[in-house]
Image: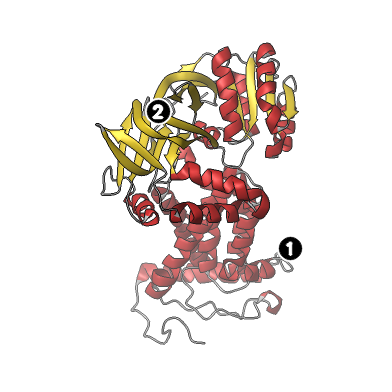
Amino acid sequence: MTPDVDLTLPKPGRHAVRDALLALDCRLFEFGAERNWPLAEPVLPRLSRSANHGVLWFAAAATIAASRTPRARRAAARGLASLTLASLTINTLGKRSVRRHRPVLDPVPLVRQLKRQPITTSFPSGHSASAAAFAAGVALESPAWGAAVAPIAWSVALSRVYTGVHFPSDVLAGAALGVGAAYAVRGMVPTRAQIVPPARPRAEVPALPDGEGLVMVANDAAGSADRVRALQDALPGCEVVECRPADVPAELERAATRARVLGVCGGDGTVNAAAEVALRHDLPLAVLPGGTLNHFAYDLGLEGTGDLARAVRGGEGVRVDAGRFTCEGTEGIFLNTCSLGVYPELVRERDRWSHRIGGWPAGVLAALRVLRADRHPLEAEFRGRAHPLWLLFAGNGTYHRVGLTPGRRHDLADGQLDVRVVHGGRRPALRLLAAALAGPLTRSPVHAAVQVGRLRLAGVAPGSLLAYDGEVTRVEGEVTLEKLPEALTVYRPLPGI
């Protein structure tokens, strides 16, 4: 192996300030080498080796993500993204720009020294940059996890001086670059805390200090037991009703007759059912995310028990829009999305196979079967002429995203349906991919986008499938999609309260 740069190049000329700083750096290094560091000997060298090639940080990210909370998963991903940027910067620019020798190991006791000494240049410290980048990235998304990671990152940086492979200034410069990388990643991909949903329109909702008056209906098939137990610990006066999916509608109706606040814990389909009951009974809704995706709860700013408990105790709530579809006697509401065409077909095919081969394989099989079918799943009439469509997507509120896949809504009361259409034609897979790549473009040969308050489709073929918040129904003839502005009152922690 050879060093990444030629360390035999002539040294630069004398410079009074630089030479004084380097001399101070050497004295600090020697001072640290001469000191006895209690309890460090069995820990710091091993910790330093574990951080080679980012192994320690990948393990830490896996541990954080294993907590299965959305904020923790985002924190782990942001930490790794920050580490990657820091490593690329250090290895492509940092170490090739400043050709500094490693410290002389004479003052460092043999027991501290690493068995395999690094051969790259000394400035800046890549280990320190990676440690600081990962810790800062995690902390920007989740301060709690950042506080847990920070002592480990600080110890890794310290170990580089302790083992004699870096001067103190190498470590400080590396840490500064690592923190800068974390903030650069945040600039490219803002954290959720930077994009706070509008606090208005605020709603008057009852404050329930101990939760008395809240009846929480939990779908036990969603694996919500831990969440509802945590909610009962935070709000001991609340009533929790756990039931099977088939019993959820009936339990919601019964709960609405005795509740001041109707609560629900489950996935988007369960939340949809609760919202419909809350609208009919004019009750505020308390949503505890308990499903796989939880789009509505997360866009609302509710990521766990703590967020909901704080809002219920403090009486913090807002009014949000609901979407409604109607078709010849059939109607329903949607809080997230409503779609016709390929997606409902995919949902139906996936549900047919998921209990046999699992969710992800069933999704892949469904996509292959639907996209290979020699027919358009939807035809709609526009200006007296029938048009084949592969997909019509309508979001309850404007989705901010890249591509066709729904992203995040910043405002749940903007009065708009976010409508996306993929026109019919040959090769549906290519058309859907082109629509996804079109991203924010409002119009392309295969893709159109518009924001409206109401949409009417005529001539929908009998038996066409319509999907809404994960549920599927059949429609035909004329289908109307419209907004119900500020129709639903929900609990949500408000910023600045």
Q: Label 1 amino acid?
A: Pro
Residue 323 has which mark? none
Here the colouring is: secondary structure
Residue 438 image point, x, y percent: 32, 50
What amino acid does circle 2 point to?
Answer: Val
Q: Along the line of sight, which residue is nearer the eye, 56 or 474?
A: 474
Residue at x 61%, y 36% (from the top left corner): 267
Circle 2 sits on which residue? 479
In the image, farthest residue toward the front: 462
SS type, badge 1: loop
Image location (x, y in percent) of residue 160 = 59, 68
**Residue 110 appears in which quarter of the rendering?**
bottom right
Q: Earlier in the sequence, mark 2 or mark 1?
A: 1
Left or right side of 150 for 140: left
Task: Look at mark 1 in the image and give the residue it sits on.
Answer: 38
Secondary structure category for the residue under label 2: strand
Q: Is residue 113 left or right of residue 196?
A: right
Q: Residue at x 67, y 27 (%)?
A: 248
